[in-house]
Image (tube, rainbow, N blue to C red):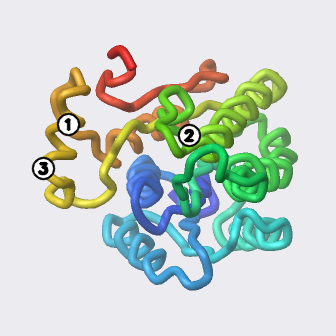
Amino acid sequence: MSRRAQRVALVTGSSRGLGRAIALRLARDGHAVAVNGLHDDGQGLAVVNEIRAQEGVAEFYAADVTDEKEAGDLVSRVVDGLGEITVLVVNATGPQPEAPSQEVTWADHLEQLEFFVKSPVLLGRLLLPAMRAQGFGRIIQIDSEVADRPPPGRSAYATAKAAQIGLAHSWARELAQDGITVNAVAPGFVPVERHSDVADEVRAGYLATVPAGRMGTPEDVAYAVSFFASEEAGFITGQRVVVDGGRGLRDP
């Protein structure tokens, strides 16, 4: 399949962690993948090389997706290099500081909203015309179980994630008639490095809450994204899959 004939997926924040796993999975599914990270990111090219070693198509595009100009430049460069973007995975995130509610400022809330609401709005507005013209589009938001089970000290993060879910639902309702689906994947606690890096007491405490009886992996999350990105999922929109091994079924 020629590069221009492939579906093109932009995965924001995909130089490491969950984003890396999602980029690798979509490349294996046959997408040409635009890997994204910040300008000083030293790992994005490694993800591209990993995809190419598996005979996939990928390029690295440095950009801050919370900046309107950089988001516009990013989309233009991806379209010029790989083709029109038909799959957008909104995964980029920043620092997630913890603080008691009385110490969380409006600026703290805005910092979280920049990633989880502003970045999808900036990119979505740029991509929707081409998706509508093709009658095909997949927008997948990566939110979090924290929106359902907010721990103490994470109010700004949990609030922004809840807003992200509302945005996904609104877009899903509005865009379905255009062949564009909008869904969300909500990871539970998923170590992004080797499981051996998780402290024994943390592992034991977590496993006690997970009916599946094992730790989650980035690949578990990537599989859910792969499903929503597929052509076969065209009749599924406005949905949210929680990838937590059943943890959410337990009492808080």
Query: What element does badge 2 sit on?
Result: loop
Q: Which residue in the rendered view is the most extreme toward the front?
A: 102
User: As rendered, which of 228 and 56 lies closer to the eye?
Assistant: 228
Q: Tag 1's secondary structure?
A: helix
Callout 2: 10 Å neighbours few (<14), some, many (20+)? many
Marked residue nearer the N-terminal end (2 or 1): 2
Which of the marked residues, 3 or 2, is nearer the chain's N terminus? 2
Three-letter code for the amino acid on which mark 1 is drawn: Gly
Q: Position of residue 79 (x, y in %)?
A: 73, 65
Mark 3 or 2: in front is: 3
Q: Nearer the viewer, residue 147 or 13?
A: 147
Mark 3 belongs to which amino acid? Asp
Q: Which residue is at 25% across, 26% downward?
A: 209
Q: Residue at x 84, y 25 (%)?
A: 174
Q: Residues within 10 Å of mark 3 (few under 14, many from 20)?
A: few
* Label 3 element class: helix
Q: CA distance from mark 3 to mark 2?
A: 27 Å
For disc 3, the marked residue is 200
Which dot marks residue 205? 1
Which disc, if any, is residue 116? none
Tell me if label 3 and label 2 are in contact, CB under 8 Å.
no
Horizontal side, residue 17 vs residue 99: left or right: left
Identify the residue under disc 2. Answer: 143
Spatial CA span between label 2 and label 1: 23 Å
Say which amino acid is labelled 2: Asp
Q: Position of residue 64 (x, y in %)?
A: 69, 71
In the image, is 46 to the left or to the right of 82? Answer: left
Specify whether residue 140 is in view: no
Q: Position of residue 74 (x, y in %)?
A: 73, 70
Picture quarter containing residue 50?
bottom left
> Which quadrant holds residue 95?
bottom right
